[in-house]
Image (cartoon, rainbow, N blue to C red):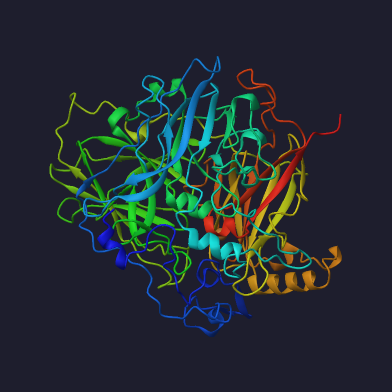
Amino acid sequence: MDASDSGDSPRAGTNPIDSGVSRRTLLRNALVVGGGAGLIAVPLDASSASAKQHAPGKRSAGTQVPQTPPLEKYVDPLPRPMTAIPDLSVYPGADYYDITMLQRYWRFHRDLGAAAVWGYWAANPHDPHKPIGMGYLGPTIIATRDHPTVAKYRNELPTTHMFQFVIDLLRKGDPQLTPIPPPPYKPTPPLPPHVNVWNVVHQHGGFTAPQSDGMPLQSYSPDGVHAESYATLDPSRVKRNEAIYAYTNHERASTLWYHDHAMAMTSLNVYAGLAGLYLVRDPADKRLGLPRGEFEVPLILQDRTFYADGSLAYTMLQVQGADTPVVNGKAYPFLAVEPRRYRLRILNASNERHWRLQFGVPRNVMPQPTLPFWLIGTDQGFRAPLQMLNFLIAPAERYDVIVDFGQLPMGTQVTLQNYDAPVHYPGASGTGPAIPEIMQFRVTKRLSGGADQTTPPKKLRLPAVVPIKPKPHTRRREWVVYQHSLFSTMTFNAVPFVAPAQDFIKAGSTEIWEFINPNHDAHPMHVHLVSFQVWNRQPLDAYGYQTDYEKWLKGGRKSVDKPVLARYLTGPPIPPDPDEAGSNKDTVKAYSEMVTRIIIQEFKPPTDTIASIPNSGTKFPATYVHHCHILEHEDDDLMRPWTIVRPPG
Ligand SMILES: [Cu+2]
């Protein structure tokens, strides 16, 4: 980086923030106040009196939010994340990866300077001097269904955080950042003394034993400080800043991903770059006739804000989301395509931003302004093809789509557009920067290899999704998104994350989970370990429910006072959205003022030994977590553990 830029562009580790708008006012959803039909949403406005009451005195309203300098669009080609190369010699019968977390430099745009970023680097078994990575994000790991993967994750990041000012505020107990639990729970320090950076890798969507799952309390720092539930396989092979995890890959072919999940700082660590794709392939899928090779393109969607020197600005203490689209690490990239079908594997790896995506085409090219596409898969794998014009993708969701550029004249520019989706959904206008355009596909390459030989999406015969049916006595479990006071910490069921699990689930059981969301924004809920289906949603008297829930809490949480959900439902059940129906999911949009129900087929963690590694299978009781995948909400404090217990006998 050029030192001459440093005057007005703070660096990693400095504090660019002096804001009157708190994270609590903007990141968290204000709860609904008011009554009857006239529900009033608390304004998410920096200047409102209620917003100010929680802001520390030294912050003044009106301080500027960092903004990315104007960038020329579509000048950088879309990068393709490299694929990591497995070492087959370390654990017989498994693909082994040696992955290091490092701070390196990465240029997000032709006209921006190189930025310090965090990323994953995979050792190259063929050449130790050429680790596989690009600085930002991580290489794609490609696994074969039912063939296990073993990974060693080494933490060599700096011991001062890239966004140290946030860590400092957190450690000081800043009320904007520190989880403040509802009574009778007491706050606990979120980090040990002297730990500014720690990390843990979670394979999102994986069917993984708890000791390899990478949950927040398994974090470990570059200098070897361990959180209380740190775990590793094969301890004789690891140093204190490392952990070895094993993955079964007993999933259907699917678009999984891996990302940081560290206690109290997941949002900062992922923003700095710690995420990558993890694709599970089924050899049988080669027969399906899907676009492959260079015609299968992963799109990792994120939003980032940059200082003038190109370095990353973390603005989410001040506003929702960031101001610039970044795909596979480049701002406003383009991809030159052939006139044929492409398979796009789209991951929303943003901290907070929901995107409503469509493929815009010039008016003179098609009778309609958008190019239809086919949805062929979601979080947990293939589904029946569904033709769509747009879709809403929440943080952590994946959409596997086929787009046909074959009917478009040479030279056509197709723009991936984002419309009608504020950062939070449905959100309020003005709470975060709008990003109407993301990237461009240019039909400029000649059709190679003769005609497009892939199967037309309508005729695809994809592995079927079997509907999960409840049984008469299927247990229902409620998770209330509860905000203890206006703009304060959000929890599930008014219990902080660090309190021990209170939910004990019998191994092998089917359950319906009810996410009760009286907030006026959606929360993307992710459940570790399991694959589920969206059952239905039902509108909720949010104000009435919230009021009576408060009464229950203030009355000492007596079970007789607990609001009975059925009394607050204001309409019939609503079936899942078309893209959710008949889909296997691991993340679901819990819409505002609704109960969202999911059905989970089976709580059955993998118990078999993986790759002959001792203690690699699940031991009961087995504790996992679920959480909101708005990463700032997860850090603060919308996450809970639950425990799978062996059934008696
Ligand atoms: Cu949330």
Q: Residue at x 55, y 45 (%)?
A: 199
**Quarter of the image where ligand 1 sits:** bottom right
Where is residue 580 drawn, in percent x and y?
51, 47
Where is residue 566 drawn, in percent x and y?
73, 63
Q: Is residue 173 visible to us here? A: yes
Where is residue 397 drawn, in percent x and y?
48, 47
Residue 136 or residue 555, whichever sits in front: 136
Where is residue 402 drawn, in percent x and y?
34, 39
Q: Residue at x 52, y 41 (%)?
A: 583
Q: Residue at x 18, y 56 (%)?
A: 363
Q: Is residue 255 visible to us here? A: no
Q: Quadrant of the C terminus?
A: top right
On the rendered structure, is 156 left or right of 298? right
Residue 66 or residue 155, whichever sits in front: 155
In this view, the residue farthest toward the bottom is: 49
Q: Vertical placement of 288 versus 354: above or below?
A: above
